[in-house]
Amino acid sequence: MKEIDIAKLRREMDEVQKNSRLEHTIGVAYTAASLAMCYGADVEKALIAGYLHDCAKHLSGEELLKICKKNDIPVSETEAKNPSSLLHGKVGAFLAKEKYGVEDEEILSAVCYHTTGHPGMTLLEKIVFLSDYMEPGRDKAPNLPLIRELIFKDIDKALLKVLEDTLMHLKNSDKPVDAMTQKTYDYYMGI
Ligand code: DGI
Ligand code: FE
Ligand code: FE
């Protein structure tokens, strides 16, 4: 893997992210590193993916759509309607490569799919997806104590619970479910 200066990456996130998002980013990076230690994934890759996962989140919906258009990144109808929520992962992976010099496909795909997941996730993708959900700064999701305990014992059981709670939350708050979020849920629920 190409050498990435992790301390520099953290400083770069410090520059583009406001206080609460930076705290969240650091929380995701260290939670992902801890899960990598627990499950034998690459700790450095987990840290890098954690630091970068929301590297496009400070951009407006308009800016995200513009980057997609300019760089031929495909945008679905649901993504076009909710760019800030649903496009910052894809654009984040693009920036991770083009701006922050990450070449590792595993890291790029963990950044890309951190919001929706996807069927057949790698261990690193699961780690980043779940760290984003349950890092220490998160306090709104239901069942956090249960998920935080379960995740270090059985990551796949924790994944099922998170997917279930996420879909329930989206439906209860009348938010359109992204096709990939639904596909991920169906795949892991065995539907
Ligand atoms: O970027 P974060 O806030 O740290 O977390 P995230 O990337 O997991 O989620 C960003 C937002 O996207 C959050 O408000 C939840 C929302 N979201 C996740 N899946 C879907 C979704 N929104 C819609 N409309 N549809 C989805 O399937
Ligand atoms: Fe995000
Ligand atoms: Fe996040």
Image (cartoon, helix red, strand yellow):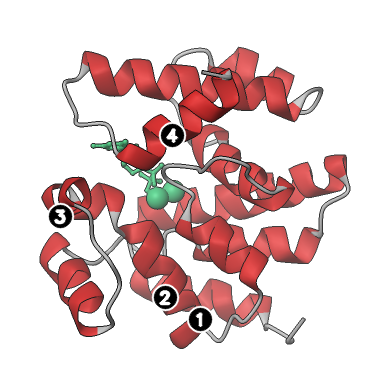
Q: Mark 2 points at which residue?
A: 94
In the image, residue 94 sits, relative to residue 58, either above or below, namely below
First in sequence, mark 1 or 4: give its number: 1
Seen at 39% across and 41% down, the residue is 180
Circle 3: residue type: Ala
Residue in the foreground of this view, choosing between 121 and 151: 121
Q: Is mark 4 on a helix, strand or loop?
A: helix
Circle 4: residue type: Lys
First in sequence, mark 3 or 1: give its number: 3
Q: Mark 1 points at which residue?
A: 97
Q: Distance between the residues labelled 2 and 1?
A: 5 Å
Q: Is mark 3 on a helix, strand or loop?
A: helix
How far across and down, in percent of the image, does residue 82 sit? 17, 47
Q: Is mark 2 on a helix, strand or loop?
A: helix
Q: Distance between the residues labelled 2 and 3?
A: 17 Å
The answer to the question of whether label 2 and label 3 lie on touching residues, with beta carbons closer than 8 A, is no
Q: Mark 4 points at which residue?
A: 183
First in sequence, mark 2 or 3: give its number: 3
Residue in the foreground of this view, choosing between 61 and 34: 61
